[in-house]
Image: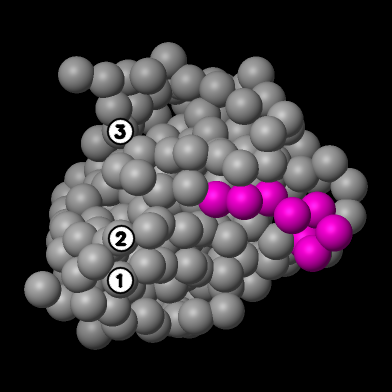
Amino acid sequence: AQSVSQHNHHVILSEAASLELGCNYSYGGTVNLFWYVQYPGQHLQLLLKYFSGDPLVKGIKGFEAEFIKSKFSFNLRKPSVQWSDTAEYFCAVADSGGYNKLIFGAGTRLAVHP
Amino acid sequence: DGGITQSPKYLFRKEGQNVTLSCEQNLNHDAMYWYRQDPGQGLRLIYYSQIVNDFQKGDIAEGYSVSREKKESFPLTVTSAQKNPTAFYLCASSTNTGSYEQYFGPGTRLTVT
């Protein structure tokens, strides 16, 4: 069965620090990958997605992610975080079995201090 | 405004009672999903439905039931058979065109004592 691993469960940064959140998936075939974000008290929303093409994907609010097929990774990055980036971040992979199912990682809770 | 609504936001029940969580969408999406979110475990799929009158079990369906009588609605019943029902429940929807992008509701926090 496919799985998604997020290496860091809690990350604490100061404003202006750079961010990289790790995500590894288990499936070796064609993958569709996602990062979702859940801000405190808000809906889970899509940050960015990768289906094909340029492995460097840009999302909302200055976030980007790089798909590295050889490493089965899809790490999320932001060069300079803000206090408003405090949230929980989830990596997800589309289930190869179809049915539009997503498999989510355990999430990384990011706290940014002013 | 298009979106997904879940009600209520907070729900409290006594152990042994069944409870139904509401999920409605006006995005004209064919597919709908129910997830359970627990701290440190991410989102786990309970049930999903690709089309009206059809639904499939997800990874943790035991103790839950659903119905899909209308395209817009996908209610989830947490039965007394669910051993650990206290959790945050998220409903989502998507098209069936292969984009895989899911849109989420605000969630219902269920507490069973």
Task: Estimate the spatial distance between the alpha carbons at disc 1 and disc 3, rounded to whole Å.
Answer: 35 Å
Residue placed under numbered mark 3 in the picture: B4
Give, as a three-letter code, the residue at label 3.
Ile
Q: Is residue B97 above or below residue B109?
A: above
Q: Nearer the viewer, residue A28 or A113?
A: A113
Q: Quadrant of the C terminus of chain A?
A: bottom left
In the displayed structure, does residue B66 sit left or right of residue A82? Answer: right
Residue placed under numbered mark 2 in the picture: A80
Please provide the residue range marked out in magenta. Answer: A65-72
Q: Residue B72: which quarter of the image?
A: top left
Which residue is outermost to the left?
A114
The chain holding disc 3 is B
Q: Local crowd at mark 3 within 10 Å, few (<14), some, or many (≥20)? A: many
Badge 3 marks a residue whose secondary structure is strand
Q: Quadrant of the N terminus of chain A?
A: bottom right
Q: Residue A52: which quarter of the image?
A: top right
In the displayed structure, does residue A35 sit left or right of residue A95? Answer: left
In the displayed structure, does residue B57 sit left or right of residue A15? Answer: right
Q: Are marks 2 and 3 in contact (CB under 8 Å)?
A: no
Give, as a three-letter code, the residue at label 2.
Ser
Give, as a three-letter code, the residue at label 1.
Ala
Q: Local crowd at mark 2 within 10 Å, few (<14), some, or many (≥20)? A: some
Residue placed under numbered mark 1 in the picture: A17
Task: Estimate the spatial distance between the alpha carbons at disc 1 and disc 2, rounded to whole Å.
Answer: 5 Å
